[in-house]
Structure formats: C-alpha cells, structure tokens
Image (tube, grey):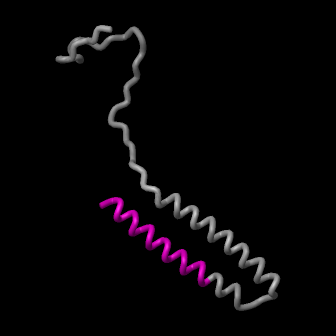
C-alpha cells in the first residue's frame, strides 16, 4: 500500500515536472536572439536531465529501518540473574 502511494505520488510529480519543462521550453522558443535561445534551451535541457536523475533516485524504494533496541555491551559485566530469566549462559 505504501509503495503504491509512493509510485502514485512520483507519477504526479513526473507529470507536473514534464508540463513545467514544456511550458518553459515554449516560452524560451518564442522570442529573443537565436544565440540566446540556444543557450537557454541548453541550460533547460541540463536542468531537465538533473531533474530526471533526481526522480530516478526518488523512485528507488528502500525500507525504513527503525531500531527497537540499542544495547551497549562492555567486557567483564554480567546481567543480574533476575534479568536473565530462563536464559542460560552459553559455554564456549
């Protein structure tokens, strides 16, 4: 369920971004000197590549690891028998 929600969100982000880049491209192509348009279109293409790389990283689903217990163990200390319960010590 969470994976599907994540993918749906990514699809929406992708659609919005593609639309935004298309609008920016049309705006750049409308006016100005040819050299300026070429320069701005090259910049836009570079931004779009970086954006696609960012989306690719977001698409990688990774589990969230939340520690339930953190224990600090030192040599030479033993737990009291009341804390050990039914656990018997191992012999090497």
- Out of 2 and 69, give the one closest to the viewer: 2
Q: Position of residue 23 (x, y in %)?
A: 60, 84
Residue depicted at 40% across the width and 65% down the height: 7
In which quarter of the view is residue 69 placed? top left
Vertical side of 43 occupied by 6: above or below: above
Vertical side of 61 occupied by 5: above or below: below
Q: Looking at the figure, which quarter contains the N terminus?
A: bottom left
Q: Is residue 5 magenta?
A: yes
Q: Position of residue 25 (x, y in %)?
A: 65, 83
In which quarter of the view is residue 28 placed? bottom right
Q: Which residues are magenta?
A: 1-23
Residue depicted at 37% across the width and 37% down the height: 67
Vertical side of 25 occupied by 86: above or below: above
Lateral position of residue 37 relative to residue 25, left or right: right
Lateral position of residue 89 relative to residue 75, left or right: left
Main secondary structure along the magenta-highlighted residues = helix
Q: Residue lying farthest bottom?
A: 30
Vertical side of 46 occupied by 65: above or below: above
Residue depicted at 54% across the width and 74% down the height: 17
Q: Residue lying farthest left?
A: 86
Q: Residue lying farthest front?
A: 92
- Out of 78 and 25, give the one closest to the viewer: 25
Lateral position of residue 29 relative to residue 86, left or right: right
Q: How many marks?
A: 0
Q: Position of residue 12 (x, y in %)?
A: 44, 73
Residue depicted at 77% across the width and 80% down the height: 38
Q: Is residue 2 magenta?
A: yes
Q: Looking at the figure, which quarter contains the C terminus?
A: top left
- Out of 62 and 66, give the one closest to the viewer: 62
């Amino acid at each position: 369920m969470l994976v599907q929600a994540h993918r749906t969100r990514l699809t929406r982000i992708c659609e919005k971004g593609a639309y935004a880049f298309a609008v920016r491209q049309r705006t750049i192509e409308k006016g100005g000197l040819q050299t300026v348009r070429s320069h701005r279109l090259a910049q836009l293409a570079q931004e779009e590549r970086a954006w696609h790389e960012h989306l690719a990283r977001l698409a990688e689903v990774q589990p969230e690891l939340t520690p339930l217990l953190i224990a600090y163990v030192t040599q030479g200390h033993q737990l009291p028998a009341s804390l050990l319960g039914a656990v018997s010590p191992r012999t090497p």
